[in-house]
Every structure is written in structure tokens, then in C-alpha cells.
Amino acid sequence: MKIGLIGRGISQSRAPELHQMLAGKLNLNYEYQLHDALASDFIDFQTTLKHLKNAGYRGVNVTYPFKELALKCADSATVGAQRVGASNTLLFSDQVLAENTDYSGFIKAYHANFGTKKAGSVLLIGGGGVGRAVAFALSELGVEKIYLSEINTQKGESLVTQLCDLDIKAELVNPDEAPRFIDHIDGILNCSTMGHHNSPGCPIPVQSLNSKHWVFDAVYIPAKTELITHATAVGARVLSGVELFLFQGFDAFECFASTLEKPALIAPFIPEIRTHYLRILNA
């Protein structure tokens, strides 16, 4: 079985390692290849997609900057992909099916860490690819209201409108004014690039965090971002970007490796693999 990952600047991706580990648990013959837009032989997304489908690939994962284009290239889409308006997983058969495992993976990561506790009111920083997936996933987690902080006003207004159309309470807030909401909300979610090793920093004033908050940071390189570090120090409940990486990966693998006759039963291996990655990435 051949799987690909299409994106830009993906040479350091840990996805191949995760998928190969899962395949090993099921004794599957499984290849996971990177197709980087920065490579000299990369033409464009559509051409690459067509080539891989014709070459017998089972499907592809898709990352920045092609997630929205991936959905447009699909013949059909799951509810999650339709809601988010983007896809990070394309499954090939006679047609191309689009899935968004950032959406499903966030829901599962949240439940794995926080159980059935409702999300409450939240400040969501960043309304791009993963931010969109998380925003719509929050509607399945008992969110009361989403305060969206997005520097691109047009993008932010569009997302807020789409959320409100689904009866999800949402409001666009000025990034400069976002910190004043923190005392009155339950959750703080960073879906921007701030905190990544290429964009160090913390998206909010750390002194505003306290133990009543729950905090999510989509960044997982490094896993211990400034936001996660400070949230942990004050006793807030935290959800690391490592967890989203893992659970979206678990869901994507199941899409690729399952058939109607033989589903990929990876549940028994998830605790061991979670422990492994949380240990090495949090080191």
C-alpha cells in the first residue's frame, strides 16, 4: 500500500514515522512517501495528485498550503471536510473522497485528555487551516461562544459568518484587544504559528493565565511551547499539539488502511504510541 504526503517544506515531517509504526503493528506492507512542493521536480498539486492516483497510491495526506485546494479536487467529502472547507486526507478509489482528520482528530484528542467536560467559551487565535478545523470541531464539544482573534480581517469575518450560519456563536475580535477577554473565558487555543521554533513567542500575555483555564496549542515543534509551559506552571489543563498530530494521524491511517471487509483495528496500540511520542517530543 502506497501513501503520500503533499505539502511545502515537509522534509522534517514525523508523519511517515507514525504511519510506518502503525503499519508495523498490523503487519501491513505500507509505504509513505513525501512529495514536497519545494522539490525541483514538483510541478503543481493537481498534477502530483493525478500522478499518484494513476501510480496506484491508496491516498494522500495534504498539508500547507494545499488543504483548501485538496477539497476542490475531490469528488465527494465527509461532513467534517465540508464543514471546514478543506481536506488534509484524500482517499483514492474510483473517485476521490476528502476527509479532514484535523477536525475529527481534535475532537478525539480533546476527549482523551478532558473527557466529557464542555469546552465553554473560548478565545481562538488564528483562523487559518487548523484554526478552521478546530473551530468547527468545538461545536461538537459544547462550546458556548468562540472569540476569534485573526489578523486577516476578511478571513476572520468569513469564518465567523460560517460558524454563525451553523448556529455556533462566534465573534471576531481585534488581536490587540483579545487579551481582555481572557479573564472571562474558559479556553485559550493557539492555532497560529506563534510558538513554533521559527516563530518563537507566546500569543497572549502569560500573566493572564490561571488554573481555571484549559489551553491548547496546535504547535508541536517544540511540544513545550511558551504557552503550554506557562499554562502548565499555573495549573491550567493543557492539550498539546502533539496530541492533535497523533489523533489526526490515527484517523488518517484508519482511512487508508481500512476496508469494508477488514477495518484497521489500531485502538489497542494507541496508548503505547501516544506514550512514545509524548515522551520523545516533550523531552
Image: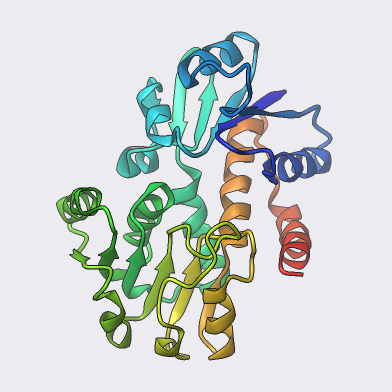
Q: Is residue 139 left or right of residue 100?
A: left
Residue 207 figure quarter: bottom left
User: Can the viewer see residue 259?
Assistant: no
Residue 124 x %, y %: 34, 66
Position of residue 150 relative to residue 3, above or below, is below
Residue, far top: 54
Q: In this view, does 103 lie to the left or right of 234?
A: left
Position of residue 72 relative to residue 225, above or below, is above
Q: Which of 25 and 278 is in front in this view?
A: 278
Q: Which residue is drawn at 41% across and 82% down?
A: 205
Task: State which quarter of the image contains the C terminus.
Answer: bottom right
Residue 38 figure quarter: top right
Residue 137 x %, y %: 38, 56
Q: In this view, does 106 lie to the left or right of 276?
A: left
Q: Nearer the viewer, residue 87 or 281?
A: 281
Q: Which colour scheme is used?
A: rainbow
Task: State which quarter of the image contains the N terminus.
Answer: top right
Residue 149 x %, y %: 29, 65
Q: Which residue is drawn at 52% across and 52% down?
A: 105
Residue 69 x %, y %: 39, 28
User: Can the viewer see residue 122?
Assistant: yes
Q: Which of 194 and 117 is in front in this view?
A: 194
Q: Residue at x 56, y 71 (%)?
A: 113
Q: Which residue is drawn at 39% across and 76% down?
A: 187
Position of residue 191 relative to residue 75, above or below, is below
